[in-house]
Amino acid sequence: MTALGAAALTGATTITTASRAAAATAVRAKGAGADGPRHVRAVVVGTGYGAAVTALRLGEAGVETLMLEMGRQWDTPGADGNVFPGMLKPDERSTWFKSRTEAPLGSFLWLDVVNKNITPYAGVLDRVAFEEMSVYVGRGVGGGSLVNGGMAVMPRRSYFEEVLPQVDAAQMYERYFPRANAALGVNHIDKQWFEETEWYKFARVSRKQAEKAGLGTTFVPNVYDFDYMKREAAGEVPKSALATEVIYGNNHGKKSLDKTYLAAALGTGKVTIATLHQVKTIRQRSDGAYLLSVQESDAHGAVLATKEISCTYLFLGAGSLGTTELLLRARETGTLPALSPEIGKGWGPNGNIMTARANHIWNPTGTKQATIPALGIDDWDNPEHPVFAEIAPLPAGLETWVSLYLAITKNPERGTFVYDAATDRAALRWKREQNAPAVEAAKSLFDRINKANATMYRYDLFGARLKNFADDFCYHPLGGCVLGEATDLYGRVKGYRNLYVTDGSLIPGSIGVNPFVTITALAERNAEQVVHQDVTPA
């Protein structure tokens, strides 16, 4: 185990207030001025999984590295004493510059009681809307690690080899996946406690119903500290997963990136993080350095400054949406005209489909539900319709008799991002009917469960009058800068030296499970190669 892995597992390393303040001060003090742009050896755009890995490995190599994050640092309690709001009482902290929250469940009994009016603010969760697909992303230091369910699942090796055949799978499963799991602080639920606790009754109910249909289930690891959860249940520590916290952040218990990789990166003394800094454009100077136009704002959206930052090495870790948009803009506006025509291609929603079932009145799912999933229905070996379905909670604080699921399916359909000059944004070419294979696969699985248990779908949860499959949003955006197509086999962007992609945009649309462990492990592999071969000593 690496030193980082030990620190992550013990929780001994955290981002200090002093280091954050120093980072912000350094950026402001060394911004554009009379002597021209501030220059740093390496810039990492974003603070999500791939970005965090890259920054740590650069810092360990002694490379001065600046991370630019468009969201805020989530470390200041609000009026309620918490950093993050719970799901049942969302406020401005919940949502990225919207006047109303946009939770995945749009209604209950067709009533508009889920979402709330809020003040626009730099909140932690964003729903980015395209014409026929919306994508959930995290905003803040730690990116998606702040708002996901923490399910740390490795893909089936055979499927990994199918998706990324050019990557040495043996090396990934023997070296980089274990390294990522250790550093992320992945742990497993106490199975005996799971069987006994009231907080996972909802999962046991779904397991029993799946088994009645001849389907198997599997426990899944997580980055939420299950020992902490047991102490929550015992009343020994403040509640988080047992207090309806997850999609708008967890105040306790969760090993998000700010407590693992990013903490270790700052600990090298070579990495700083500038928050509320959004990269707008990228161009290359005649000397080969990259020049970034960066907009600094406050948490209420007011622009404070526009500055220029130059770097020798540029790593893009802004996620499938952010990284792809930056490169598309650079290619189509002519600031980086030699970028590959493959930029923007190979996008997919990881086959995400959400659905829910109505249970019989004599089969309640429980008034108390942990927000962290611990069990999945594994039907990935189904030759016709492979599905891995997370058994998701619905922690409403009252009995709902609802079984909720996020199905991850094997959908071969892909979308393409294109640059829209009128809006200066990336537009997604993806049609609703492209999700038909994913819906068909999910329906095949849950039809079997309903038939075996004489149950039916819930049609009231997804905003429309009669809708039992949510196929218009996703949690797992992948692709846009596909490994080996838009980049070489280690994320080096084709057409330019010292320009790299290090996030989920490298994965072509699907990986079969929650993707963050794969993104992390792939970033470990790529960073090891790039830092060793490309980054010269200062």
Image (cartoon, rainbow, N blue to C red):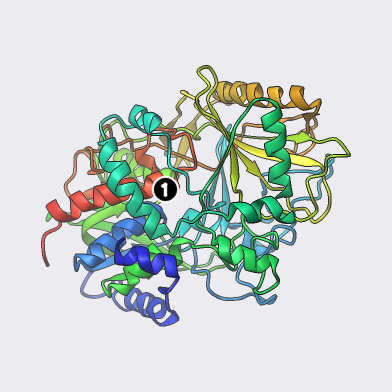
On the picture, is 294 further left or further right than 141? left
Say which quarter of the image contains residue 248.
bottom right
Say which quarter of the image contains residue 414.
top left
Identify the residue shown where x is 25% and y is 38%.
Answer: 487
- Can you say whether 158 is above or below 529 in the image? above
Nearer the observer, 172 or 354: 172
On the picture, is 317 further left or further right than 299? left
Q: Is residue 239 visible?
A: yes
Measured as percent of width and height from the top left, residue 191 is found at: 60, 51
Nearer the observer, 329 or 243: 243
Circle 1 sits on which residue? 517
Residue projecting furthest to the front: 192
Q: Is residue 317 visible?
A: no
Identify the residue shown where x is 84% and y is 49%.
Answer: 399
- Can you say whether 145 is above or below 216 in the image? below
Measured as percent of width and height from the top left, residue 153 is found at: 47, 44
Identify the residue shown where x is 53% and y is 21%.
Answer: 382
Measured as percent of width and height from the top left, residue 123 is found at: 58, 61
On the picture, is 471 further left or further right than 415? right
Mark 1: few/some/many CA within 10 Å (<14, 14-19, 20+): many
Numbered disc 1: secondary structure: helix
